[in-house]
Amino acid sequence: MYRLLIGAAALALSTSLAHADGHQPFAVGEGDFNWDSYEAFAAKHDLSGQTITVTGPWTGLDSENVTKVLSYFESATGATVNYSGSDSFEQDIVISARAGSAPNVAVFPQPGLASDLASQGLLTPLPEGTAEWITENYAAGSSWVDLGTYANKDGDEDLYGFFYKVDVKSLVWYSPEAFDEMGYDIPETMEELKELTDLIVEDGGTPWCIGLGSGAATGWPATDWVEDMMLRTQTPEDYDAWVANEMKFDDPKVVAAIEEFGAFARNDDYVDGGASAVASTDFRDSPNGLFSIPPKCFMHRQASFIPTFFPEDSESDFFYFPAYESKDLGRPVLGAGTLWAITNESEGAAALIEYLQTPIAHETWMSLSGFLTPHSGVNTDLYASETNKALGDVLLNATTFRFDASDLMPGEIGAGAFWTGMVDYVTGKDAAEVAEGIQTRWDAIQ
């Protein structure tokens, strides 16, 4: 086993290693991981005897995986890390932070809640130099700094959130067999995607499978479409202004993005079952048409989780939901992710944030499952599957990353009026009228 026990730290580390090894899926030094980053970090930090508490939303497999990742931090530093996951994390962290009993580090599934706690003085700014490191080492680095920067209780802004473990939404899924049989090429631009859409119709097929049904949450898949279209038709600054209600929902730019979605979803020739079926089709069932013989549809825009609902033994692939070449807005990516913030300052908490900057902290989870990273210094061959590797490439090639807008808006809008408004739109209501109604609702809760 490859050990990095140097000087006086050796004896202290040995007790931690005995604990950490039980969680480690491979021995330190094995494989093509960046063990140099581990060694350099271990040489700088002796946290023997210290305990670091971490709380987050992960339970089940994700909880097991993050525990494995943190075991390498333990073996490098001699610290003990106690992670606890909760399905009610959002409520628990607010209660504990206000009571002065917060964990050292909290893992937030949405920036909005972290921003709220920062504004109450309940978060500690990340160590000096973290923002510069993110800008230099994350693809679209400034996007991640922006997403983790909030105002404190005095209104002064600082970096509070470090993003680690990301999800990608800007994807189009398809059946390689169906594409090959028809001789279709993967579109590289939005212009080409629209040309392919028309070509499929000319060939007698149906290009898209779209479903907005999701029980009480019906309508949310359409919000992702609109968000992606905002990023492909407007600047990132416009997107941010829209999220913050500085650009109103009924602004012509937002209305135009809704209509970009409608150009696909409200065209009977473009959608499996016709436009009238979009609102009533469950989003989990909607991609099934990709795999029927002959295909009922050829493309499905959805996030990286959707293969969970594909028919068993089906073969699928995806491509990046492309940007307009003519608009010169780069390669924007819509997604979500978790950010780590210091909720109870300690030497170990600051060290843990620093550890998340090492390639090894990312590569160890990459080799397991369910993890994507924008870290440009990792060995992408270590991803657990070719699919994850390709998803990781989408992140690494992004010029802009933006968080799901509906998740950042007030709940009554992002998880209410926006959802229902999109259902009204696909069932025939005018985009401008829908947008005006959403804005009226937003104004009412100010």
Image: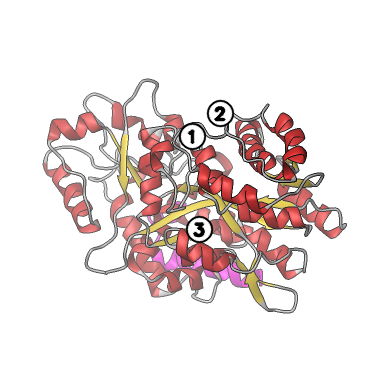
Q: Image height check: is 290 above or below 156?
A: above
333 and 253: which is toward the camera: 333
Which residue matches tag 2?
26
Task: Give residue 314's position: percent from left, percent from top.
Answer: 34, 24
Residue at (36% x, 20% y) in the render: 313
Q: Amino acid at mark 2?
A: Phe
The residue most toward the front is 7
Residue at (57% x, 60% y) in the render: 408
Does the segment drawn in magenta span residue 442? Answer: yes
Q: Which mark lies nearer to you, 1 or 2? A: 2
Which residue matches tag 1?
367
* Distance (Cα) linking label 3 and label 2: 33 Å
Q: Secondary structure at mark 2?
A: loop
Mark 2 is surrounded, within 10 Å at the Cα level, by few (under 14), some (14 to 19) or many (20 or more) other residues, namely few
Q: Which residues are magenta?
A: 423-446
How many numbered discs?
3
Which residue matches tag 3?
403
433 and 53: which is toward the camera: 53
Q: Earlier in the sequence, mark 3 or mark 2?
A: 2
Quadrant location of the N terminus in the rendered image: top right
Quadrant location of the C terminus in the rendered image: bottom right
Q: Which mark lies nearer to you, 1 or 3? A: 1
361 and 436: which is toward the camera: 361
Q: Earlier in the sequence, mark 1 or mark 3?
A: 1
Q: Image height check: is 124 above or below 167?
A: below
Task: Give residue 148's position: percent from left, percent from top.
Answer: 59, 64
Q: Quadrant of residue 383?
A: top left
Q: Earlier in the sequence, mark 1 or mark 2?
A: 2
Q: Is residue 63 visible?
A: yes
Q: Which mark lies nearer to you, 3 or 2? A: 2
